[in-house]
Amino acid sequence: MSKLLIVGTLAFDEIESPFGKTGKILGGSGTFIGLSASTFGVESGIVSIVGGDFPESYLKMLNDKNINTDGVEIIKDGKTFYWSGRYHNDLNSRDTLVTELNTLADFNPIVPNNFKDAEFVILGNLHPSTQLSVINQMDTRPKLIALDTMNFWMDSALPELLEVIKHIDVITINDEEARQLTGEYSLVRAAQKIFTMGPKYVVIKKGEHGALLFNKEDIFFAPALPLEEVFDPTGAGDTFAGGFMGFLTKTRDISFDNMKRAVISGSNLASFCVEKFGTERMEHLKIDEVSERLQQFKELTQFDIELD
Amino acid sequence: MSKLLIVGTLAFDEIESPFGKTGKILGGSGTFIGLSASTFGVESGIVSIVGGDFPESYLKMLNDKNINTDGVEIIKDGKTFYWSGRYHNDLNSRDTLVTELNTLADFNPIVPNNFKDAEFVILGNLHPSTQLSVINQMDTRPKLIALDTMNFWMDSALPELLEVIKHIDVITINDEEARQLTGEYSLVRAAQKIFTMGPKYVVIKKGEHGALLFNKEDIFFAPALPLEEVFDPTGAGDTFAGGFMGFLTKTRDISFDNMKRAVISGSNLASFCVEKFGTERMEHLKIDEVSERLQQFKELTQFDIELD
């Protein structure tokens, strides 16, 4: 059985939205990626760092979903990464209120021995040097390495970002960030430029407008499911990426046709994530709900038309 | 053979974009709808009004595409509707520089006798009372009436707009306008509210982000084709609507499954419209190009996935 290695944050989030205000709740890219991938029943392991304030119960919840946390370093007298944000009324934009790196400031990732042979690796949004360090610790070149990043690293660590991008297969990035990274407004041209930087696949995330998957020859589009209500978008992008990689880890097929299924799976899972605050929806998601909504995706997108 | 009645403007457009500046060129909602529908070889007729300055050659070009212009009133000593706009660098937003209604200010549409039995009617973006007048002139209730409108009429003629909406089957409207009309941010909820106003089908146009088709039970999504370059978005929405109605007029099947094909056809045709200034691309579009790009739409959206 193939394994998925996840590098990302385990965090405390505190969120304000038009629907209310949470206290400190579980968040972080590693958390959302792991929960999403776990819906495929794959064996995964998280590499991360937390403080002594991180509840044991959170780690147990992850372990119960077959997410190994041996790679999570616990700094007893340190504090866990904390992020607080406020969403605007349309939930499409937000202000960051507080970011406290805490233990994350000195994060030196250690890949556990039993994950050094993982076939699938996803490098969640972290400093590009941290991401590169993980790649360098692998015993064998993984079958597929995906990387998520954001504009913050383009502004503050572009050379390191360009270096790690050389060593990966799939980059997931949002539309504005793809434009910033390449200087191209057209997402088709942006993807073409990113191919020259190393990746063989580009996934451009457009939030409520869906996601585009590119390789050098083909394009595929996965819509976001139109929802009556979006409650909290936090983690949706990571949930998408986790679903994408979870599906690939389960099926071990990295053909473009299978990647199409993987982005649909990611989009499907992200549609659940936003229905409740934080990880609540993902923690209690049932496989039947996932299958049922996949049927909705088919109805939403599939058509038959004669080509004259 | 079934007929399509089109009500809309024939206009002079003058466009500035990062790619250059046109002189006065052919434009107008009726023009773009007609050209787009004509790719399906259907018999259509335009009801509109122009001034003596409107070139005979434009009418002939339309006639050569089986677009009847008997319903186009020519005011010899009047001037044709004129619109001028400037697109911003991203081509996603524009400023209107000049709008001269001219003959359009006193437009009193007259449906030619041989189109009073048209099975398909599309009411392009005009004053809602003008749109209603056309419906009232029909001898028999058409099989399907579609209406396009915009925020301008919501601001200036809302009661008349709400009245005409009661009498139609399909409304095409962009996302911001759907939100304005209903006070709902979620497009799913906006569509539900529009159903209570009369229409049985709602098409929400999202520009480069595609279009959503709703009936009371189902949702379908047609993406816009990702393009390397968008040259001039003018008329894309009308081209989409014309393709949608042209396809339905040709096939005479208004099941939801066939409407899916119709929105894909509309999206397909709109992808050509934006490739050159004004009507240039649509005037010279070949059927082979349309079929070939339809294949691209299939590759862009179709996937097979097992439901567990």
Image (tube, coloured by chain):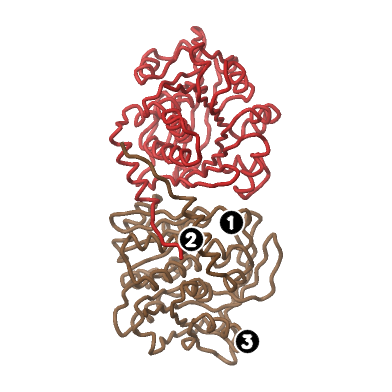
Chain colours: A red, B brown
Q: Which residue is mark 2?
A: B267
Relative side of B253 to A84, left or right:
left
Instruction: Say which quarter of the image contains residue B161.
Output: bottom left
Q: Earlier in the sequence, mark 3 or mark 1?
A: 3
Alpha carbon distance from label 1 to label 2: 17 Å
x%, y% of residue A165?
Answer: 64, 30
Subunit of label 3: B
x%, y% of residue B112?
Answer: 41, 88
Residue lying at 39% horizontally and 73% vertically, measured from the top left: B249
Task: Classify 10 Å Cα crowding around label 2: few (below 14), some (14-19), many (20 and above).
Answer: many
Task: Classify 10 Å Cα crowding around label 1: few (below 14), some (14-19), many (20 and above).
Answer: few
Q: What amino acid does circle 3 point to?
A: Asp
Q: Which residue is mark 1?
A: B92
Q: Which residue is mark 3?
A: B53
Q: Does the rendering let one see residue A9?
A: no
**Same chain for marks 3 and 2?**
yes
x%, y% of residue A32?
Answer: 44, 28
Secondary element under disc 1, as helix, strand or loop, is loop
Alpha carbon distance from label 3 to label 2: 33 Å
Secondary element under disc 2, as helix, strand or loop, is helix
Alpha carbon distance from label 3 to label 1: 31 Å
Q: Does the rendering let one see residue B129?
A: yes
Mark 3 vs 2: CB contact within 8 A: no
Residue lying at 49% horizontally and 28% vertically, measured from the top left: A84
Q: What amino acid does circle 1 point to?
A: Asn
Subunit of label 1: B
x%, y% of residue A239?
Answer: 44, 32
